[in-house]
């Protein structure tokens, strides 16, 4: 090509198949269409047409009706029955001019009908019209597929964003969760050491010691142990201090030596009042030895109870952590109890709550499960509870109310913090809006909450005045 010349590209107007058993008709239609810029394949019978069309799909088919072996009606029906070829438009072109035959052509799947002898301009106009429709439908299908892919990508991104926010919240809770697990672990370790020490020091000598006691002294030992184990374990430190002072005075009044030390032992046994039998025992020569032995035996039992309580507490935290961190990638709604999800979040925030927050739970005695996405709803409760605790600076009252109004479950989370100014209330659900300093908040928390509630066909609203802020979440029971 010499410089200065330009290369013109052929515009692909469409690929057309013409099926007709008459060679002259084939040549005529082929010449007409090629002059207009169409790519044309000429096929003389129905069998060849079916195999050729499936091998290379055209954009349009011009189909004669009256052909030997297989007529145009049957060819069209078989094309429409084939998933690969069913969307290719078919225009019948035939010398048959009866209305019944035209109706039969449309019933077979044709989109138009041209009667022979035809007018060239009519053929070209109808070909152009149906090609435009075909291309528009094809383009619409492609756009719909692209939209479906984009929608799926958006859902995936949103799910990832919810999980990311969840992990971010979990990261902030790690220190508190570690403390909540280390505390029971420390209690378990201390209790195990007490049990080991008892058995190391006394196991070999215990039968021997018991044999040195009279039957009456053995009974005194058993009575002390039984009385100790019957006492409740939830005395406050204040109650114990008051009881210790009272016991000391009583023991001194009964002329018991080392009254303050014995009072300490009795309080540790959970015995906060003296009795004539205890006073009588303490006045005997082996009274202190029996009291100490009772203390050591009951300490093993109490240490065992402490281990059970501590393991239950640690297990509860671990279960809450596992429940919160999981994510159901199947994306299916399941039956779940809303209160269980709220309690999971409260367990994870226990270290923050116990520093100075009173939690008031207004839960009904019975509560229906609902079909929902519980992992995502846990993110809602996390965000709302976390915001409430921050609003109170972790000092105040957090009230959680769960109830039913008509066909909705209603969850209210109320704090007695400073409140939210009206100008912020109108913006707080907008993405990326935050009042926190740079680097301390993404501004996506409440936006994600809103999207999760929308996904459940529910509603969230806020009502705030100085000293009280309530977030209300309504979820349909039969969504």
Image: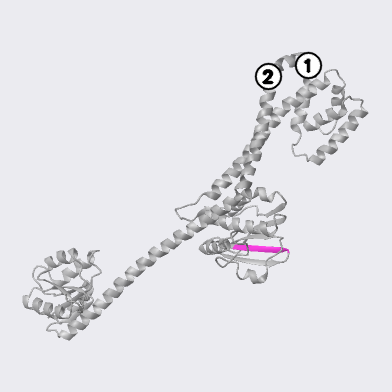
Q: Residue furthest left?
A: 23
Measured along the vertical axis of the image, is residue 70 above or below residue 263?
Answer: below
Which sits in the foreground, 383 or 85?
Answer: 383
User: What kind of element bears circle 1?
Assistant: helix
- Mark earlier in primary sequence (2, 1): 2
Please identify the dominant SS of the magenta region.
Answer: strand
Please report the bounds of the magenta region as a residue range.
Answer: 467-473
Query: Residue 24's quadrant in the figure?
Result: bottom left
Specify the quadrant that holds the N terminus. Answer: bottom left
Percent position (x, y) of residue 323? 55, 48
Checking the image for residue 453, the label placed there is: none
Residue 434 seen anywhere in this rendered image of the structure: yes
Q: Is residue 18 magenta?
A: no
What residue is shown with label 1? 215
Q: CA distance from mark 2 to mark 1?
A: 20 Å
Q: Nearer the viewer, mark 2 or mark 1?
A: 2
Q: Position of residue 155 (x, y in %)?
A: 45, 61
* Closer to the camera in the image, 374 or 345: 345
Crowdedness of circle 2 by 10 Å Cα count: few (<14), some, many (20+)?
few
Residue 373 visible in image: no
Q: Position of residue 442 (x, y in %)?
A: 56, 61
| Residue 472 counted in the magenta span | yes
Q: Residue at the location (75% across, 36% down)? A: 232
- Residue drawn at x 44%, y 63% is 154
Residue tagged 2: 203
Is residue 439 rendered to the left or right of residue 206?
left
**Image spot of residue 395 (x, y percent):** 72, 55
Task: Tell me if residue 328 comes above or below residue 82 in the rendering.
Answer: above
Q: Is residue 86 above or below residue 365?
A: below
């Amino acid at each position: 090509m010499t410089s200065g010349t330009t290369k013109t590209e052929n515009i692909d107007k469409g690929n057309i198949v013409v099926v007709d058993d008459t060679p002259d008709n084939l040549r005529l239609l082929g010449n007409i269409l090629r002059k207009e810029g169409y790519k044309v394949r000429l096929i003389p019978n129905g069998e060849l047409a079916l195999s050729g069309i499936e091998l290379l799909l055209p954009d349009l088919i011009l189909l004669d009706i009256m052909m030997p072996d297989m007529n145009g009606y049957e060819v069209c029906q078989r094309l429409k029955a084939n998933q690969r070829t069913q969307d290719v438009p078919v225009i019948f072109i035939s010398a048959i001019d009866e209305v019944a035959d035209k109706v039969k052509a449309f019933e077979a799947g044709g989109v138009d009908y041209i009667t022979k002898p035809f007018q060239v301009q009519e053929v070209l106009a109808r070909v152009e019209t149906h090609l435009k429709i075909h291309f528009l439908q094809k383009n619409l299908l492609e756009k719909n597929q692209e939209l479906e892919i984009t929608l799926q990508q958006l859902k995936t991104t949103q799910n990832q964003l919810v999980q990311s926010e969840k992990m971010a919240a979990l990261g902030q809770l790690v220190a508190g969760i570690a403390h909540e697990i280390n505390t029971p672990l420390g209690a378990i370790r201390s209790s195990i050491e007490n049990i080991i020490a008892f058995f190391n020091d006394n196991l070999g000598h215990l039968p021997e010691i018991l044999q040195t006691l009279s039957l009456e002294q053995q009974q005194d030992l058993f009575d002390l142990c039984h009385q100790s184990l019957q006492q409740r374990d939830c005395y406050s430190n204040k109650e114990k201090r008051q009881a210790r002072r009272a016991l000391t005075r009583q023991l001194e009044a009964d002329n018991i030596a080392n009254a303050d030390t014995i009072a300490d032992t009795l309080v540790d046994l959970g015995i906060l009042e003296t009795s004539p039998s205890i006073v009588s025992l303490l006045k005997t020569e082996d009274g202190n030895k029996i009291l100490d032995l009772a203390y050591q035996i009951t300490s093993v039992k109490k240490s065992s109870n402490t281990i059970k309580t501590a393991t239950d507490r640690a297990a509860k935290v671990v279960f809450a952590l596992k429940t919160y961190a999981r994510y159901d990638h199947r994306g299916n709604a399941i039956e779940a109890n809303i209160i269980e999800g709220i309690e999971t979040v409260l367990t994870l925030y226990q270290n923050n709550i116990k520093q100075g927050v009173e939690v008031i739970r207004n839960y009904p005695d019975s509560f229906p499960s609902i079909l929902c996405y519980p992992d995502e709803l846990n993110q809602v409760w996390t965000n709302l509870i976390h915001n409430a605790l921050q609003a109170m600076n972790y000092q105040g009252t957090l009230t959680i109310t769960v109830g039913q109004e008509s066909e909705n479950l209603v969850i209210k989370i109320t704090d007695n913090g400073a409140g939210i100014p009206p100008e912020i209330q109108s913006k707080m659900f907008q993405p990326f809006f935050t009042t926190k300093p740079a680097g301390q908040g993404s501004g996506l928390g409440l936006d994600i909450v809103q999207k999760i509630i929308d996904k459940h066909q529910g509603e969230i609203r806020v009502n705030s005045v100085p000293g009280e802020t309530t977030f209300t979440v309504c979820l349909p029971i039969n969504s």
